[in-house]
Image (cartoon, helix red, strand yellow):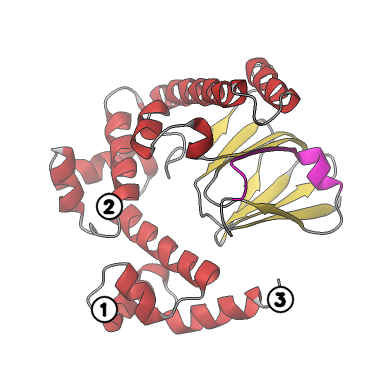
Amino acid sequence: MRHHIATWSVPGPIQTFRIQCLSDLAGKHDPVLVDKGAMYTILWLKEGSGTYIADIDAVQMDADTIYMFKPQQALSVLVADEARGYVIHFSLDFLGVKPDTFRQFTGSSLFDILSGTLTIPAGQDDSLDVLVSKMKEQDVNDPIVPELMKVMLLLLNQKNNVVSERANGYGNIFLVKKFFNLLEQKFLTMKMVNNYARELSVTPNYLNEMIKKNTGFSARHHIQQRVIMEAKRKIMQEGLSMKEIAYYLGFDDSYHFSKYFKNVSGSNFSEFRKQTMHQLSFI
């Protein structure tokens, strides 16, 4: 089984909407470059197999599954020849909504850390197929296209909520979603569990308990991982130094950031940056 790589670069927002068929990407023998820019991405693997790499984490993809990515994530995808499905990119400008409206519109869950994957059982994807087909048929400048995209997001959010409620029950999952939504907005300035607990009007112990019950890891773990993920993105996408990244992430000095990076990731910052920059030089 041959695999072909499709790589998303992150220059500027050249386009605001684009749909590609995975079958087209699988037919390419050379890397397929796509300007992701400030766009959200929906990767829907209907049939076949493949692997995606978001930032530095490689994940094996399953058929009948939708994967959702936020803007500025460095993405690459390896898809088998028989892969079928779609890659959809869209920006908030294309939808004509602001960030706060978008979070309300999608229930603050589709693109968060907890809910970035959605399984769509075979035979239950007809409505999604119809929407994607209609969007592909229309000119990108047709005002009906963003409206169809909004309907698709609402449908995905509805399916996501049903899955979440069945898996976790009512009550807990909504606090968890609020936590991840808040984490995405505040991780640069809030790095303690009690900060998030105060914002969410719960005790730190209760927040930790609910997050661990639903994800398997504590709130503190997710906060630390989000900070380290951003540090690695800054290395990969901008090649920033330790001092520059420490300042960007709100650390008082490079020494404390270096210790934090080593304790959380298990790797020495300088060695990780050197290895990463060496690997990127071959891309």
Q: Residues within 10 Å of mark 1 (few under 14, many from 20)?
A: few
Asked whether residue 130 is in view, the answer is yes
Relative to residue 149, is residue 213 drawn left or right? left
- Give the amino acid type for the residue marked by disc 3 in the picture: Phe
User: Which segment did they paint magenta?
Assistant: 14-27
On the image, numbered disc 1 is attached to which residue?
256
The answer to whether the residues at label 3 and label 1 have Cβ atoms under 8 Å apart is no
Q: Residues within 10 Å of mark 3 (few under 14, many from 20)?
A: few
- Give the amino acid type for the residue marked by disc 1 in the picture: His
- x and y percent of residue 78 in the render? 73, 52
Q: Quadrant of residue 133?
A: top right
Q: Earlier in the sequence, mark 3 or mark 1?
A: 1
Q: Residue at coordinates 41% horizontally, 69% vertically from top-left?
A: 265
Q: Quadrant of residue 221?
A: bottom left
On the image, numbered disc 2 is attached to which residue?
186
Relative to residue 278, is residue 3 drawn left or right? right
Q: CA distance from mark 2 to mark 3?
A: 34 Å
Q: Earlier in the sequence, mark 2 or mark 1?
A: 2
Of residues 283 and 115, the one nearer the viewer is: 283
Query: What secondary structure is marked by label 2?
Result: helix
Query: What secondary structure is marked by label 3?
Result: loop
Query: What secondary structure is marked by label 1?
Result: helix
